[in-house]
Image (cartoon, rainbow, N blue to C red):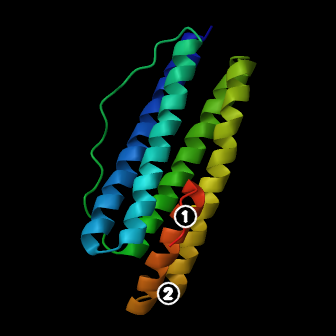
Amino acid sequence: MLSKVIEKALNDQIRVEAESSQIYLAMACWAEVQGFEGVAQFMYAHSDEERMHMLKLVKFVNERGGHARVSDLKEPPAKFGSFKDMFQTLFDHEVMVSKSINDLVHITLEERDYATHNFLQWYVSEQIEEEALARNILDKINLIGDDKGGLYLFDNDVKQIVAQTSGAPQQ
């Protein structure tokens, strides 16, 4: 059984994950309009992944005797300036999500809810991967600079990342 404190904290995290999905979706739309198919595919896939993170939390809350809440979300931006700006936004967002997960883990320890603490360890590990991936992509964009040919190759490289992580055959 979840305490009211844990239930509220988990519902707050459900909102964070839902907003993450929306942010990635907005980034996918922006990249697609810019003509970057690989980046758009990457962002669409990550939007779906964030939604799955949210649903995993929803199911956990409901299965533990709580009531998962679907709340209103902040509208994400529609424009991101440059690809560097967009990926910097992505990285900064992932750092914020990591902090949110860490705060949630801290609450579970204060509440002595070790089952929820154990459940959240998957999210802790996931955030380490998400931050590393975002940092790696941002580093590549910084290396490319404003080189249009480099951005074209980068877009194709990102397509390969999506293919590898989804198990789809590479082109």
Residue ID at (29%, 60%): 29
Residue ID at (30%, 50%): 76
Q: Position of residue 168 (x, y in %)?
A: 53, 59
| Residue placed under numbered mark 2 in the picture | 144
Q: Is residue 140 above or below residue 149?
A: above
Residue ID at (57%, 21%): 60
Q: Name the kind of residue labelled 2 in the image.
A: Ile
Q: Position of residue 68 (x, y in %)?
A: 45, 19
Q: Name the kind of residue labelled 1 in the image.
A: Pro
Q: Mark 2, residues whose alpha carbon is within 10 Å: few (<14), some, or many (≥20)?
A: some
Tell me the tag on residue 153: none
Q: Position of residue 147 (x, y in %)?
A: 42, 92
Q: Nearer the viewer, mark 2 or mark 1?
A: 1
Q: Secondary structure at mark 2?
A: helix
How far apart, in angstroms, are the residues tagged by discs 2 and 1? 27 Å
Q: Are marks 2 and 1 in contact (CB under 8 Å)?
A: no
Q: Which image quadrant for residue 16?
A: top left
Q: Position of residue 102 (x, y in %)?
A: 64, 39
Mark 2 or 1 closer to N-term?
Answer: 2
Q: Mark 1, residues whose alpha carbon is within 10 Å: few (<14), some, or many (≥20)?
A: few
Does 30 sit left or right of 89 as displayed?
left
| Residue placed under numbered mark 1 in the picture | 169
Residue ID at (30%, 72%): 81
Q: Is residue 24 above or below residue 31?
A: above
